Amino acid sequence: MKSPKPKNEEEKTNSVLTISDIEDYKYKNITKEIAENYIQEYWINGIIILIISTLFYFFQGQLTDFFIYDAIFIALLIFGIYKKIRLVGVIFFIYFLIGKIIIFATYPGYINIITILISLSFLKSFYLGILGLFKWHEINKKN
């Protein structure tokens, strides 16, 4: 629920700034160039995830049909992000998140501060990529 707009300068200084206000402000100030940078970072990080998952399956000795389908699926999602398809960006984010939950549940020995920080940094990058995708389409729709 949004708070009513302040009527004078005194009310502006006393109004509470919420996280949604900050996120709304950040989203409104994303230019086309920033959006394109977020999108580029998104698909490049997707390629990095593809390489990491390939190495993970290789060193686990689990190069099975599932791995091949997983790698093809990730590659197609990365291509969709490169082509700036919003739905694909959201699907890849959810797929990565669910995959991390499954990996951490299956291999609890891999849970440490480094893997958590790396996963969180990828999630942040993917979130910004999704913002970039939506903002890029919003800007191009106006033109």
Image (spheres, grey):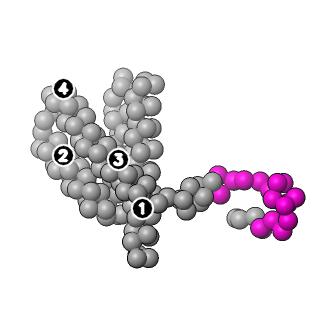
Kind of residue at badge 4:
Phe
In what quadrant of the picture does the N terminus appear?
bottom right
| Residue name at image x 32 percent, y 51 percent | 40
Give how far apart the Cα atoms at labels 4 and 3 are.
27 Å
Apparent side of residue 76 relative to residue 30 in the rendered image (left or right): left
Q: Mark 4 — residue?
A: 59
Q: Which residue was labeled with disc 1?
A: 32
> Label 3, on which residue?
41
* Location of residue 75 in the rendering, given as x and y in whole percent from the top left corner: 20, 50
Q: Residue at x 45, y 44 (%)?
A: 124
Tags 4 and 1 touching, CB below 8 Å = no
Which image quadrant for residue 54? top left
Could you say whether the residue bearing mark 3 is in a helix, strand or loop? helix
What residue is shown at x 44% (from left), y 31% (from top)? 116
Is residue 43 shown left or right of residue 16? left
Asked if residue 90 shows in the view, the reply is: no
Determine the secondary structure under disc 4. helix
Stretch of the chain drawn in magenta: 4-21
**Precedes in sequence: disc 4 or disc 3:** 3
Marks 2 and 3, Cα distance to the nearest angstrom? 19 Å
Q: Amino acid at mark 1?
A: Lys
Task: Name the amino acid, label 3.
Answer: Glu
| C-alpha gap between disc 1 and disc 2 | 31 Å
Query: Which numbered disc covers residue 71?
Result: 2
Give residue 143's quadrant in the image.
bottom left
The residue mark sitting in front, 2 or 3, is 3
Residue 123 appears in which quarter of the rendering? Answer: top left
